[in-house]
């Protein structure tokens, strides 16, 4: 399992873009984790799946609400990562009104989740291997803090915990 001081694994996530821009087309676009975290401070939180009750009611809204506080604490970007495809993450982003605040990144095949060792096996519930619920502060590609949630809990992976760590 990844730990504080480790470098994030090399992986490609997908981000759904609503608008065609420089170097990106409408639809899923690749995000190279190594390149996208280089020289930046990232508040990253991961969830088992999009549109789940706790994640939609508490996790994502908490990070959106605290966007300005994270920026003031020196965080360059906020990432939400989930084992879903980019289309689902794009729909969830629209639903949660994350535009310009939280990047909703798809780990469609669970490559990133598996590489971090932060997985949750929900095969018995018909959902396969998902990401565990956690948050981490990443500085220049290295894990500066890590908060892994106990199963069925919502105590340490929310915005308040990670914001306090970002403020130092």
Image (tube, rainbow, N blue to C red):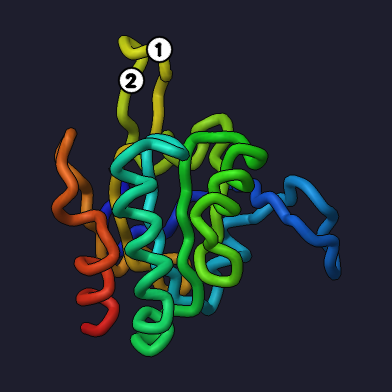
Please state which of residues 53 and 107 is positioned toward the viewer in this rendering.
53
Which residue does the image show at 22% across and 68% down from the upper left?
160
* Residue at 38% across, 47% down: 56
Apparent side of residue 151 relative to residue 41 in the rendered image (left or right): left
Q: Where is residue 21 in the image (x, y as percent from the top left)?
A: 84, 67
Residue that label 1 marks: 126
User: At which x and y percent is residue 131?
Assistant: 38, 36
Q: Say what secondary structure mark 2 lies in.
A: strand
Percent x, y of residue 46? 38, 48
Query: In the figure, 4 relative to 111: above or below?
Result: below
The quadrant in which residue 119 appears is: top left
- The residue at the point 41 percent across, 83 percent down is 68
Residue sitting nearer the eye, 33 or 134: 134
Decide which of 168, 96 is in the foreground and name it: 96
Q: Quadrant of the C terminus?
A: bottom left
| Residue 88 shown left or right of residue 42 in the figure | right
Q: Does 19 sit left or right of 118 as displayed?
A: right
Give the answer, above or below, for where 1 lies relative to 43: above
Image coordinates for residue 147, horizontal then vertical, percent: 22, 55
The answer to whether the residues at label 1 and label 2 have Cβ atoms under 8 Å apart is yes
Q: Which of 85 and 30 is in front in this view?
A: 85
Q: On screen, 83 above or below 137?
A: above
Quadrant (top left, top right, bottom left, bottom right) of the N terminus:
top left
- The dot on residue 45 is none
Q: Quadrant of residue 36?
A: bottom right
Asked which secondary structure carries label 1, the reply is: loop
- Please give the name of the residue rendered at 54% of the width and 60% of the height, measured from the top-left corner: 97
Residue that carries the numbered disc 2 in the rendered image: 122
In the displayed structure, does residue 121 sit left or right of residue 168? right
């Amino acid at each position: 399992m990844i730990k504080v001081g480790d470098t994030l694994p090399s992986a490609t996530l997908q981000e759904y873009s609503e608008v065609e821009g420089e170097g990106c087309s409408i639809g899923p676009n690749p995000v190279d984790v190594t390149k996208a975290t280089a020289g930046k401070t990232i508040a990253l939180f991961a969830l088992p799946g999009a549109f789940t009750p706790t994640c939609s009611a508490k996790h994502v809204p908490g990070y959106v609400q605290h966007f300005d506080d994270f920026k003031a604490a020196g965080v360059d970007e906020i990432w939400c990562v989930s084992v879903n495809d980019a289309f689902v993450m794009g729909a969830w982003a629209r639903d949660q009104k994350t535009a310009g605040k939280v990047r909703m990144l798809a780990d469609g095949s669970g490559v990133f989740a598996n590489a971090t060792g932060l997985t949750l096996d929900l095969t018995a519930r018909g959902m396969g291997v998902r990401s565990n619920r956690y948050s981490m502060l990443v500085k220049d590609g290295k894990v500066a803090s890590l908060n892994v949630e106990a199963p069925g809990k919502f105590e340490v992976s929310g915005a308040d915990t990670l914001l306090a760590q970002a403020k130092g």
